[in-house]
Image: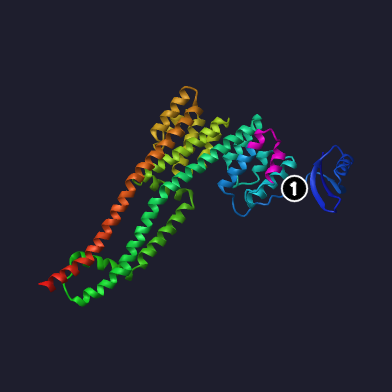
C-alpha cells in the first residue's frame, strides 16, 4: 500500500514524503527505526511537484551528467545511489537542481525514463527513448555510455564547425568595419580639400566621394533594411511553414547550401544509428530524428518517408523518393538493408559524412581566406587611388 506521511527527526525538522508498506503500523515501525517520529499518515500518494529551472541546461552540463552517471552505473552502483553521488558534485545550479528532483522521483517509485519525462525541454526525446530501451532490456549502463559518446561527438562537431568559421567571419567583419570607417570618416575630410582646389576630379574619386556622401547622409536606409530583414527572419522562423521556406533558401545558397546539406545528413544518420543500434524501433527512430535534425525541409521529407516505411517500403526506397536526401547516403543505406546490417551501414554513413564535411570545410577555408584578403586589398587600393590621383594631378600641374 502507498502512504503519505509527515515525520519529525531528532532535531525537530519536518519531513514529508511517500512510502510503501503493508500497513500503517509497519510504516510507523519503519520510520521509528530510522529515528523519525510519525506525525501524520494517510493512505494514497501525494502529488509530485516538479520545479523546472527557468532556463534550460546546456549541452555541456547534460554531457557531464550523462558521462558521470554512465561511469557509476558501469561500476554497478544502483541508479538511486548514483544520483545521490552526482547530487554532491557540481554541474551547474540548474543541473544540480534537476538531479535532486530526479532522485526524489525515483524514491517515489517512478522509473528513470518516467522521471526524465517530467523535464520536457531539458532531456530530448532521443535521450528519454534511449533510457526506456535501456531500462526495458536491462542494459542502462551501456545505453548511458552510448548516449554520452553521442553527445560528446555532437559537441565536438559543433566546436569544430564554429572554430573553422570563426576566423573568416572575424576577418570579414573587421574588413567591413575598416572600410565603413574609411569611407565615412576619412574620405569626407579629403572632400573639403578637393573642393578648395577647384580642379576636375578623376571619375574614380567622384565615385568614392559619392559613396562616402551617401553613407553619411543616408545611413538609415541600410539600417532600416537590416531591421526589416531581421524582423522577416524572426517571423518566418516562428512557424513551420516559414522555417520550411527559410531552410529551403539556405539549401539553395551556392557552396554553403551543399555544406549545410552534408551537415544535416550527418546529424540525421548519426541519430538514426544511435537509436536503431540501441534497439529502438525504426519507425520510432524516424519520428524522433525528424524532430532533432533542425532543418524543416529534411524533417518534412523524413516524416513523409516514415509513412512510406509504415506502408511496408524499405527505408532506402522511402528516402530515395525525396531528392533532398543525398544519393550517396541513400545507396549506402540500401546496401545495409540488403545485407541485414542497417545499423553498421548507418555508422559508416555517419563517418563518411564526417569526413566529407571536414574536407569541404578545409577546401572552403583554403579558398575563402585568400579571397577575403584579396578583396580587402582591392577595396583599400581603390580608396587609396581615389585619394592619391587628385593629389598627384595637382603636383604635376604645379610642377608644370
Q: Is residue 37 left or right of residue 185?
A: right
Q: Residue furthest left?
A: 400
Q: Residue at x 35, y 67 (%)?
A: 219
The quadrant holding residue 261 is top left
Q: Residue at x 60, y 53 (%)?
A: 55
- Residue 172: within the magenta? no
State which quarter of the image contains the N terminus.
Answer: top right
Q: Residue at x 39, y 32 (%)?
A: 328
Q: Is residue 113 above or below residue 215?
A: above
- Say which of 286 and 355 sits in front: 355
Residue range corresponding to the magenta coloring:
71-87
Observer able to see residue 320: no
Whole-percent x and y of residue 123? Answer: 60, 44
| Residue position marked by numbered label 1 in the rendering | 47
State which quarter of the image contains the C terminus.
Answer: bottom left
Estimate how packed mark 1 is, as few (under 14), some (14 to 19) or many (20 or more) residues with alpha carbons within 10 Å: few
Whole-percent x and y of residue 181? Answer: 34, 65
Observer able to see residue 222: yes
Q: How many marks?
A: 1
Whole-percent x and y of residue 286? Answer: 52, 35
Q: Residue furthest top?
A: 339
Amino acid at each position: 500500500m502507498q502512504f503519505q506521511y509527515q515525520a519529525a527527526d531528532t532535531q525537530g525538522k519536518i519531513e514529508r514524503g511517500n512510502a510503501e508498506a503493508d500497513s500503517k503500523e509497519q510504516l510507523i515501525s519503519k520510520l521509528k527505526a530510522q529515528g523519525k517520529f510519525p506525525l501524520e499518515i494517510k493512505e494514497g500518494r501525494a502529488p509530485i511537484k516538479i520545479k523546472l529551472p527557468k532556463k534550460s541546461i546546456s549541452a555541456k552540463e547534460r554531457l557531464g551528467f550523462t558521462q558521470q552517471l554512465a561511469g557509476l552505473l558501469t561500476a554497478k552502483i544502483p541508479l538511486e545511489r548514483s544520483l545521490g553521488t552526482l547530487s554532491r558534485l557540481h554541474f551547474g545550479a540548474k543541473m544540480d537542481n534537476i538531479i535532486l528532483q530526479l532522485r526524489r522521483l525515483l524514491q517515489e517509485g517512478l522509473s528513470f525514463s518516467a522521471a526524465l519525462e517530467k523535464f520536457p525541454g531539458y532531456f530530448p526525446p532521443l535521450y528519454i527513448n534511449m533510457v526506456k530501451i535501456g531500462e526495458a532490456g536491462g542494459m542502462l549502463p551501456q545505453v548511458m555510455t552510448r548516449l554520452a559518446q553521442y553527445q560528446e561527438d555532437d559537441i565536438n562537431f559543433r566546436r569544430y564547425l564554429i572554430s573553422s568559421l570563426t576566423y573568416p567571419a572575424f576577418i570579414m567583419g573587421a574588413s567591413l568595419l575598416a572600410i565603413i570607417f574609411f569611407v565615412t570618416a576619412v574620405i569626407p575630410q579629403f572632400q573639403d580639400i578637393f573642393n578648395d582646389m577647384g580642379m576636375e576630379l578623376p571619375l574614380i574619386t567622384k565615385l568614392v566621394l559619392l559613396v562616402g556622401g551617401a553613407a553619411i547622409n543616408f545611413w538609415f536606409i541600410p539600417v532600416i533594411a537590416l531591421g526589416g530583414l531581421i524582423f522577416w527572419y524572426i517571423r518566418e522562423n516562428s512557424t513551420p511553414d516559414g522555417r520550411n521556406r527559410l531552410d529551403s533558401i539556405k539549401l539553395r545558397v551556392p557552396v554553403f547550401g551543399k555544406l549545410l546539406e552534408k551537415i544535416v545528413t550527418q546529424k540525421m544518420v548519426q541519430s538514426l544509428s544511435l537509436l536503431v543500434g540501441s534497439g529502438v524501433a525504426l519507425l520510432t527512430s524516424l519520428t524522433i530524428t525528424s524532430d532533432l535534425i533542425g532543418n524543416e525541409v529534411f524533417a518534412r521529407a523524413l516524416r513523409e518517408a516514415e509513412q512510406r516505411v509504415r506502408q511496408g517500403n524499405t527505408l532506402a526506397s522511402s528516402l530515395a523518393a525525396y531528392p533532398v536526401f543525398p544519393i550517396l547516403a541513400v545507396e549506402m543505406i540500401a546496401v545495409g538493408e540488403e545485407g541485414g546490417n542497417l545499423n553498421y551501414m548507418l555508422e559508416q554513413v555517419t563517418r563518411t559524412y564526417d569526413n566529407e564535411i571536414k574536407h569541404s570545410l578545409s577546401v572552403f577555408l583554403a579558398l575563402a581566406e585568400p579571397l577575403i584578403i584579396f578583396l580587402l586589398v582591392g577595396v583599400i587600393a581603390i580608396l587609396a587611388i581615389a585619394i592619391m590621383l587628385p593629389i598627384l594631378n595637382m603636383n604635376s600641374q604645379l610642377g608644370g
